[in-house]
Amino acid sequence: MESILTVKNLSTYFYMEEGVVAAVDDVSFELKPQEVLGIVGETGSGKSVTVKSIMRLIKPPGKIVRGEVIYKGQDILKLDEKEMYNIRGKEISMVFQDPMTSLNPLFTIGNQLMETIMQHQKVSKEEAYKRAIEMLKLVQIPEPEKRMKSYPFEFSGGMRQRVVIAIALSCNPSVLIADEPTTALDVTIQAQILELMKQLQETLKMAMIFITHDLGVIASMAHRIIVMYGGKQMEEGSAEDIFYNPVHPYTNMLLKSIPRVDKKVERLEPIPGQPPRMIDIPKVCPFLPRCPRSVDECSKSVPDMVEVSPGHRVRCFNPVEGGV
Ligand SMILES: Nc1ncnc2c1ncn2[C@@H]1O[C@H](COP(=O)(O)OP(=O)(O)OP(=O)(O)O)[C@@H](O)[C@H]1O
C-alpha cells in the first residue's frame, strides 16, 4: 500500500552558542493510510522535534538541515508558508501535550472550533456551528450546545483535551499527530483519552503518529513503532517486533526497565548511565556510552539502519538475537 507520508533522512539541528544540537539526525520512515505509528524514546530523544519538523514548526536557532517530507506526492518542506498553511491543520493536524497551549483562554470553545472550521473550509457560519456541535459530540462532550458557550477554564483537563482533539479533527485531516497527548492528565483520564483517540482513529480511518515516552501507552495504540535515542532512530518494527523480538540493545534495556503483566520480572532494571549530552555529539552511536554490547566498530562510525526481517530495521553493529 502506498504511503501517505514519507520522511526521508530528516535532520534538524539547533545552532546554540555552546555548539550544534543534532536534535533529529537522519530519521526516515513511512506512514501508511490508517496506520498508527508510535514514536517512543526518553526525554530529549528528538520525538517532538521530528514531528514539529514535519509540521514546519521549527523556529531559529533550530533549522531543518536535510531531508524530505513527502505528503501525498509532494515535498512539503519545499512549500511556501501560504501553501503550508493549507496543509497544517487541514491535511495534517496536531494535538499537543498541554491542552492549554492550544486553546485561547479569552475565547469560547465554540468560537475556537468555528474559527478553525471557517479558516480551512468554505462554509457559512451556520454550517460551521453545526459542524462544531458534531465535533463536540464526536469527542463525547455532553450537552455540546451549552458547552459551545463555555471558556477553556470552565472545563476539566480531560475535557479540554477532548476539545483540542475536536479542533484538530474538525477539518477531517488525513494524518493526526499526537505529541504526548495524555501526559498532562490524571491517570484515569489518560486512559479515557487514549481510548477515545483509538476509537476516533478507527472510525475516521485516519493515519496517526503517536508520540510517547511510555511503552505501555504505545503498546495499546501503535501498529508500528520507532524507538528513538539521541536524535536517531535506533529500531523500527511492528509492535510485535519491538515487544517480542527487540534487537537493539537500547530497546532491550528499555523493555526490561518497565513492569510487565505478561512476564514476571525479578526487579526493574534501570538503564545505567545518563542520556546523551546532545551538543556536538561525536559521529558514533549515541547509545555507545551506555551500551553493554559495544564492539570495536561502534567507536568508529554510526551504523546504518539495516533490515533484519521484513519491516524490522535496526541501527546497531551488534544487535541482540532472540529478543528479551
Ligand atoms: N528550542 C530549542 N532550542 C534548543 N534546543 C532544542 C530546542 N528544542 C529542542 N531542542 C533540543 O532537541 C533535543 C530533542 O528535543 P525533543 O523535544 O524533540 O525531545 P523529546 O524526545 O520530544 O523529549 P520530551 O519527551 O521531553 O518532549 C533536546 O535534547 C533539546 O536539547
Image (cartoon, grey):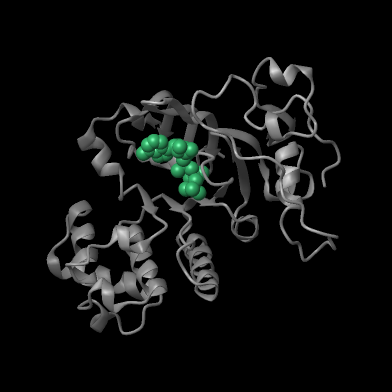
Locate residue 257, reporting x and y percent.
73, 53
Residue in front for this viewpoint, 32 or 49: 49
Q: Residue at x 24, y 42 (%)?
A: 85
25 vs 180: above or below: above
Task: Tell whether 226 sits left or right of 62.
Answer: right
Using the rendered image of the protein, determine whether residue 71 is visible from the camera's viewpoint.
no
Residue in front for this viewpoint, 317 or 81: 317
Q: How many marks?
A: 0
Residue in front for this viewpoint, 228 or 292: 292
Q: Residue at x 65, y 60 (%)?
A: 216
Locate residue 5, reporting x and y percent.
46, 38
In this view, the residue farthest toward the left is 125
Q: Which quadrant would residue 121 be assigned to in this image? A: bottom left
In this view, the residue farthest toward the top is 300
Task: Tell whether 268 sits left or right of 24.
Answer: right
Q: Residue at x 71, y 35 (%)?
A: 290
Locate residue 159, reporting x and y percent.
38, 74
Locate residue 281, reporting x and y percent.
55, 24
Q: Quadrant of ligand 1?
A: top left
Q: Residue at x 69, y 30 (%)?
A: 289
Point out the image quarter for the N terminus: top right
Using the rendered image of the protein, determine whether residue 160 is visible from the camera's viewpoint.
yes
171 vs 15: above or below: below
Task: Tell whether 53 sits left or right of 145.
Answer: right
